[in-house]
Image (cartoon, helix red, strand yellow):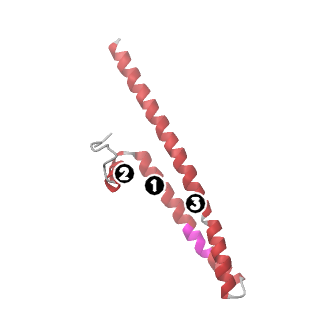
Amino acid sequence: MGNLKGLTEDEPIPERWERYWRTFVEFRRTIIGLTAVWGFCLMLDVPIRTLVIYKTKTPEQAFFIGSIVTFVWMQCPVIFSVIYVKLMKNLLEKRLKEKESNTVAAIVNNEI
């Protein structure tokens, strides 16, 4: 499992995240997945804003409509993040329970 010393709530968050990054593959996958989705959504915001600018008649309209479109569009990665993190957390808990039950089963089988 790697270096797990300092598993306390008193550990500073940056150090805890660094330890998680080095130790847990699932943590890395989650962060990389979130970064990719957010990057894609933010890059897609540029052509959407450009389209709004060229389709509106005044700069005020472009600003107003662009702000609304961006606000609505940015809800997509927010909702994705909430759902994805919950799914990954449930998956990690399931894997930890399986690993724990396999370890207990192995101990029981070796003792008999």
Residue 43 falls within the magenta-colored stretch: yes
Is 79 positioned to the left or the right of 91 in the image?
Answer: right
- Residue 14 x/y as whole percent: 34, 56
Lower position in the chain sequence, tag 1 or tag 3: 1
Identity of the residue drawn at 57% across and 65% down: 41
Task: Please state, as top left, top right, bottom left or bottom right, where the C terminus lies in the image.
Answer: top left
Q: Which numbered circle lies on residue 31?
A: 1
- Residue 4 x/y as whole percent: 30, 42
Lower position in the chain sequence, tag 3 or tag 2: 2
Neighbour tally class for label 2: few under 14, some 14-19, many 20 plus, Cα within 10 Å = some
29 to 108, vertically: above or below: below
Neighbour tally class for label 3: few under 14, some 14-19, many 20 plus, Cα within 10 Å = some
Residue type for callout 2: Trp
Q: Which numbered circle lies on residue 88?
A: none
Mark 1–mark 3 distance (CA, rounded to whole Å)? 13 Å
- Residue 63 x/y as whole percent: 64, 81
Q: Which numbered circle lies on residue 21?
A: 2
Residue that badge 3 annotates: 77
Identity of the residue drawn at 51% across and 40% down: 91
- Residue 3 x/y as whole percent: 28, 43
Identity of the residue drawn at 31% across and 43% down: 7
Lower position in the chain sequence, tag 2 or tag 1: 2
Residue type for callout 1: Ile
- Residue bounds of the magenta highlight: 42-47
